[in-house]
Image (cartoon, helix red, strand yellow):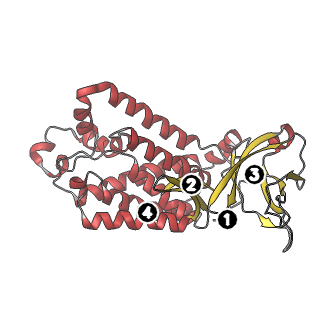
């Protein structure tokens, strides 16, 4: 299952999430530039349990180097697909968690989840001499927070069936629940050092994300994130929209749905890509929202409704919803 998009709205630009992605990309490029020295670099800055469990190895590293490796390992990756998979998951789930926690809390949350995931792997693979690298443990923590905050959000998922792509919307609690069960099953049936995947880091990160979220939500806010929100508030809604149209009547071929745009987009106009369910497959349609649209006005898209008995198709009516961000609003999960 490949997640493509979620339906939980995010009203602030995820500056920390994008910065984390940027740092991971820069570090990966640096790894590639090292050539044959990349393995040595990974051993030095990756998480190697034997560096902590074997005194004869630990003596080659200072206390500061040992501590730093507990953080630096989550910014290294073993290959292009490893990097892309992790950063894509962070991009999908991270913006919503950052939106809810605020930028500074989210940064602390991300690093703590990565640290706990590393400790989980270290304790359960105590004598392994194989470096563990990757952001997947920290991202698992983000996913753990997401399932608590937005359990009923829909995840647009690509499921390859042979050579045919199947797009389906899956509730977040089911998508992430299945993902966690897969990680837990692999962790209990194999050893991360042998399989090449730190399964226990994923499990530890996910559980720590759920727990740390509850802790951070009880702490008083410093207020800095609220002062940053006017600077990071999104001026535009997502270009991609997933629709859930309803039939206008039992004997009517027309269907209706809504499309959310920002005040700026209502004033200046915009173009969106909508995902419209069409039987087994979903249909992608480009929609132009003209300038000057008012809240509650409707767009008529001819021929995108249900089939008519006499031939042809009904129309799709999109009601425009102009969104206004409220920092105290808690979005439905």
In 3D space, how far apart are the residues under numbered discs 4 and 3 (Cα atoms)? 32 Å
First of labels 2, 4 by sequence position: 2
- List the residue tagged with mark 3: 325
Q: Position of residue 60 (x, y in %)?
A: 14, 37
- Tell which circle, 2 or 3, labels the residue nearer the N-terminal end: 2
- Name the residue tied to disc 2: 97
162 left or right of 122 in image: right
Mark 2 closeness class: few <14, some 14–19, many ≥20 residues within 10 Å: many
Sequence-earlier tag: 4 or 1: 4
Residue 287 lies left or right of residue 20; in this view the side is: right
The answer to whether residue 190 shows anywhere in this view is yes
The residue under label 1 is 332
* Gap between marks 1 and 2 measured at Cα: 13 Å
Residue 8 visible in the shown view: no
Q: Say what secondary structure mark 2 lies in.
A: helix
Q: Where's residue 208, x and y in %?
A: 42, 61
Front position among marks 4 and 1 = 4
């Amino acid at each position: 299952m490949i997640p493509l998009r979620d339906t939980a709205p995010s009203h602030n630009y995820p500056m920390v999430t994008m910065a984390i992605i940027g740092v991971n990309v820069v570090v990966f490029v640096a790894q590639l530039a090292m050539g044959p020295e990349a393995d040595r670099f990974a051993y030095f800055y990756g998480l190697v349990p034997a560096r902590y469990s074997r005194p004869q190895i630990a003596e080659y590293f200072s206390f500061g180097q040992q501590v730093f490796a507990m953080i630096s390992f989550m910014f290294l990756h073993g290959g292009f697909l490893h990097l892309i998979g992790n950063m894509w998951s962070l991009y999908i789930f991270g913006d919503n968690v950052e939106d809810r926690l605020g930028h500074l809390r989210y940064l602390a949350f991300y690093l703590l989840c990565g640290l706990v995931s590393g400790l989980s792997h270290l304790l359960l693979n105590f004598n392994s001499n194989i470096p563990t690298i990757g952001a997947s443990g920290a991202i698992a923590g983000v996913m753990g927070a997401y399932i608590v905050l937005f359990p009923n959000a829909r995840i647009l998922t690509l499921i390859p069936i042979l050579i045919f792509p199947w797009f389906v919307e899956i509730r977040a609690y089911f998508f992430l629940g299945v993902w966690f069960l897969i990680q837990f099953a692999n962790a209990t049936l194999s050893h991360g050092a042998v399989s090449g995947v730190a399964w226990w880091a994923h499990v530890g990160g996910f559980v720590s994300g759920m727990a740390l979220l509850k802790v951070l939500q009880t702490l008083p806010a410093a207020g800095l994130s609220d002062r940053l929100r006017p600077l990071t508030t999104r001026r535009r809604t997502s270009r991609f929209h997933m629709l859930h149209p309803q039939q206008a009547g039992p004997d009517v071929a027309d269907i209706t749905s809504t499309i959310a745009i920002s005040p700026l987009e209502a004033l200046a106009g915009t173009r969106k890509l909508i995902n419209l369910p069409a039987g087994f497959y979903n249909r992608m349609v480009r929609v132009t929202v003209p300038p000057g649209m008012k809240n509650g006005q409707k767009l008529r898209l001819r021929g995108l409704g249900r089939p008519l008995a006499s031939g042809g198709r009904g129309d799709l009516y999109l009601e425009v919803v102009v969104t206004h961000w409220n920092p105290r609003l808690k979005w439905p999960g």
